[in-house]
């Protein structure tokens, strides 16, 4: 763990410390944010997450197989085992999107089409996020998938608690009950992050020369994901004025 603290975590500490100061996160946590913006943001976030969640099992499994080929047996086996836990998680986002859209359509205009929202092409940030995984797996350091998982799942630990507190304040508790994936991962990713930290420590002991490659991959993943959230918020702000009436919990 000492090597992890002194190398990789020292390299990404500025990134992590700046999360709550990120303009998109600050905007989402703004006490004056309108309920309709939050509602539309959640629809955008969940609907687009379907296509970047569906390949996660494959990404992790393939990275694990590559690690086995490089002789990183423990890392490879751990990734392959973890991949099974990610199976069909995109189905949760499909259910959540449909539930959020149904709630929106019951109160606001114009109505939204959940299936059309989920069928849209990837945004630029989503494309970067997808390409990062594919290029990492196909490249010289497929084990950098561990850093990607470490940082992205760590966002659930650092960002979801304050965001959920804000959403609950703005919308009330009921709308959040349909966010099955986000609610579940706010809890289980605490354990996942602790596990990923141990895996990162083992990886750095085996490949201390990979410190910078791991930091680059982890940083690129978080940066792409924050840009994706910014894209979702931009759509929410643009379309929110078209919604009518406050959320009942905010009335």
Image (spheres, grey):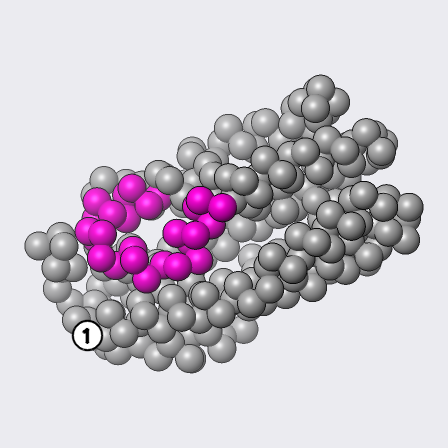
Q: Residue at x 85, y 46 (%)?
A: 73
Residue depicted at x 35% and y 38%: 162
Q: Residue at x 78, y 36 (%)?
A: 203
From where the camera sits, is residue 127 visible? Answer: no
- Is 186 a magenta residue? yes
| Above/below status of 121 relative to 134 | below
Q: Is residue 121 above or below residue 18?
A: below
Q: Position of residue 142 (x, y in %)?
A: 80, 50
Corner quadrant of residue 209? top right
Residue tagged 1: 106
Residue occupying the point 78% across, 53% down: 64
Residue 241 visible: yes
Magenta part mainly helix, strand or loop? Answer: helix
Q: Confirm whether the magenta stretch covers residue 145.
A: no
Q: Residue 92, position in %: x, y? A: 45, 66
Q: Residue 181, how many percent across, how many down?
A: 44, 58
Residue 43 drawn at (x, y percent): 36, 64
* Quadrant of the drawing holding the N terminus: top right
């Amino acid at each position: 763990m000492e090597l992890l603290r002194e190398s990789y975590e020292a390299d990404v500490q500025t990134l992590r410390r700046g999360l709550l100061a990120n303009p998109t996160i600050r905007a989402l946590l703004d006490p004056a944010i309108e309920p309709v913006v939050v509602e539309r943001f959640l629809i955008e976030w969940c609907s687009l997450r379907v296509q970047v969640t569906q390949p996660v099992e494959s990404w992790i499994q393939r990275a694990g197989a590559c690690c086995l080929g490089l002789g990183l047996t423990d890392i490879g086996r751990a990734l392959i085992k973890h991949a099974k836990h990610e199976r069909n998680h995109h189905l949760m986002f499909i259910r959540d999107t449909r539930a959020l859209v149904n709630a929106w359509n019951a109160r606001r205009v114009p109505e939204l089409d959940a299936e059309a929202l989920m069928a849209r092409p990837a945004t630029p940030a989503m494309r970067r996020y997808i390409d990062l995984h594919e290029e990492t797996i196909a490249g010289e350091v497929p084990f950098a998938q561990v850093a990607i998982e470490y940082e992205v799942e760590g966002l659930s630990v650092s960002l979801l608690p304050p965001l959920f507190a804000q959403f609950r304040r703005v919308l009330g508790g009921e709308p959040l009950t349909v966010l099955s994936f986000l609610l579940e991962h706010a809890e289980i990713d605490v354990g996942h992050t602790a596990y990923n930290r141990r895996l990162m420590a083992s990886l750095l002991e085996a490949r201390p020369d990979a410190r910078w490659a791991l930091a680059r991959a982890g940083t690129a993943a978080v940066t792409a994901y924050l840009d994706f959230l910014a894209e979702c918020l931009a759509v929410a702000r643009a379309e929110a004025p078209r919604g009518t009436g406050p959320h009942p919990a905010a009335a």
